[in-house]
Image: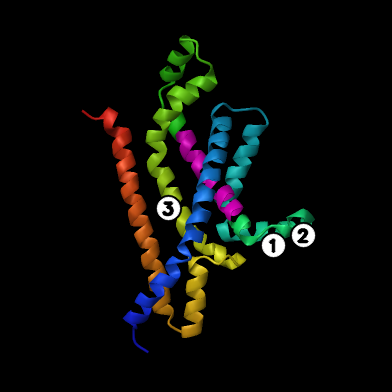
Amino acid sequence: MGFDFQYMLGLLPILFKYLGTTMAMATWGVVFALILALLIANIRVFSVPLLSPFCQLYISFFRGTPLLVQLFLLYYGLPQIFPFLVGLNAFSAAVIGLTLHFAAYMAESIRAAIIGIDRSQMEASLSIGMTKLQAMKRVILPQATRVALPSLMNYFIDMIKSTSLAFTLGVAEIMAKAQMEASSSFRFFEAFLAVALIYWGVVVLLTQIQNWAEYRLNKAYTR
């Protein structure tokens, strides 16, 4: 059975209908992951007692275990211990899993960007009457954003691709639909090539957005 180009073209509109679910998972995941990562990064930067060792343990676990295992633990394992989680739907479980997994990586990138800013910036801010919180918000974090942006965008791109694992929980996203179409037609190559092209197109678009954002942020630093 040879390659059927027309079948693949006909499959693209079907798969595009499920792209919204994929992007929704990734978007919610990156928003929550950034919030959590900022909190963890600041806890580690300021070495908050009790919380800092806990954050180190959190980062170690979520960076040291596969995302698929984490999703299974969250969706299938934890409800056995905590019955109130039985009602958790697959989409929410996938978003939570993506959030927890990528927050661990993002926290380290943000922490590295923050400590990469010269200490004199904080000292100068404190000398003019700012609190540490104000200095972080107005001086340190804006500069750290420029440094951390490339790695954070890479994690967002990786998160979009990682949403393909959500079909193992039963989420009807683009990968799940491709799997169903391939199983019914036995055109596995065409189906998965179509998925690959869609993911590739999304990543190319996000790369252009990243380049534009980096140009805007670096504009003040170029002569």
The rendered magenta stretch, by its main secondary structure, is classed as helix
Q: Residue at x 34, y 45 (%)?
A: 210
Marks 2 and 1 in Cβ contact (< 8 Å) = yes
- Distance from the alpha carbon under mark 2 to that under mark 3: 33 Å
Residue 87: quadrant of the picture: bottom right
Residue assigned mark 2: 80
- Distance from the alpha carbon under mark 2 to that under mark 1: 7 Å
Which amino acid type is marked by label 3? Ile
- Image spot of residue 167 (x, y percent): 56, 66
In the picture, measured across the screen, residue 61 lies left or right of residue 209, that is: right
Q: Please check the rendered image and state whether residue 107 is part of the magenta-colored stretch, yes or no.
A: yes
For label 2, the crowd category at 10 Å Cα-Cα, with few meaning under 14, some 14 to 19 and many 20 or more, is few
Q: Which residues are magenta?
A: 95-112
Q: Nearer the viewer, residue 169 or 172?
A: 172
Residue 76, labelled with which disc? 1
Residue assigned mark 3: 157
Which amino acid type is marked by label 2? Gln
In the picture, measured across the screen, residue 79 lies left or right of residue 158, that is: right
Local secondary structure at mark 2? helix
- Image spot of residue 82 (x, y percent): 77, 54
